[in-house]
Image: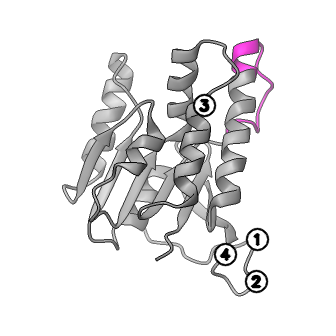
Amino acid sequence: MSFKVILITGGARSGKSRYALQLAQKYGRKVFIATATGCDDEMAARIAKHRKDRDSSFATIEEPVMLGNAINCLPSNTNVAVIDCLTVWLGNLMHNAGTQKDLPEIDNFIASLRQPPCDIVVVTNEVGMGIVPDNELAREFRDVAGSLNRRVAEIASQVIFMVSGLPINLKDANSETGGIIMGNTENPKFS
């Protein structure tokens, strides 16, 4: 059986996580892979809000660094895993590695997506559409995040861009055209 990868990207507070959770609701056994750590009060509050936003039907795995391993070790009865989010994960990797350009965990993660054990919904931020950062580390983060997002999009059967809470389908391998499409083919109603 072939499983699919869905990438949901967009700006901060655009509705990416909410949309990912809504897509996962149609599945039986759901896992939420959280990449954030409560490193300060503000981040701890964000994590608490995310926990509240998903219902008890999600099992939660907290994995801030070894994301590929988390996917490979999912319980065998998992139907879908939601990963939230890649840019937080990348920040964790870069924090642990310093300014080191070689981040082997990215390749491990990409390899885990090529033959996923279940459907995977990946949430990420589109960070490269604004002002060029004023420091080298921030520019490196922007560049690596852009490359990471592109690599995941190449693998994904569907790519959704969230804008102001609205999903725009950028790629859908299951559509009649079989590739890139523009438009909103499935817009769940948020309550």
Q: Amino acid at mark 1?
A: Ile
Q: Nearer the viewer, residue 58 or 2?
A: 2
- Distance from disc 4 to disc 1, alpha carbons, whole Å, reads 8 Å
Residue on which the image places disc 4: 173
Q: Nearer the viewer, residue 10 or 29?
A: 29
Which numbered tag is attached to residue 104?
3
Tell which circle, 3 or 2, labels the residue nearer the N-terminal end.
3
Judge from the rendering whether residue 89 lies leftward or rightward of residue 36; answer left or right. Answer: right
Mark toward the start of the polypeptide (4 vs 1) = 4
Residue that mark 1 sits on: 180
* Residue type, numbered disc 2: Thr
Foreground disc of the pair 3, 1:
3
Residue with the mark numbered 2: 177
Indicate which label's residue lies in the foreground, 4 or 1.
4
Q: In which image quadrant can residue 170 be found?
A: bottom right
Q: What residue lies at 33% left-to-right and 23% top-to-bottom? A: 38
> Please, what secondary structure does the residue beneath circle 2 have?
loop
Dividing the picture into quadrants, the one containing residue 142 is: top right
Q: The residue tagged with tag 3: helix, strand or loop? A: helix
Element carrying mark 1:
loop
The image shows residue 163 at horizontal and vertical percentages of 63, 54
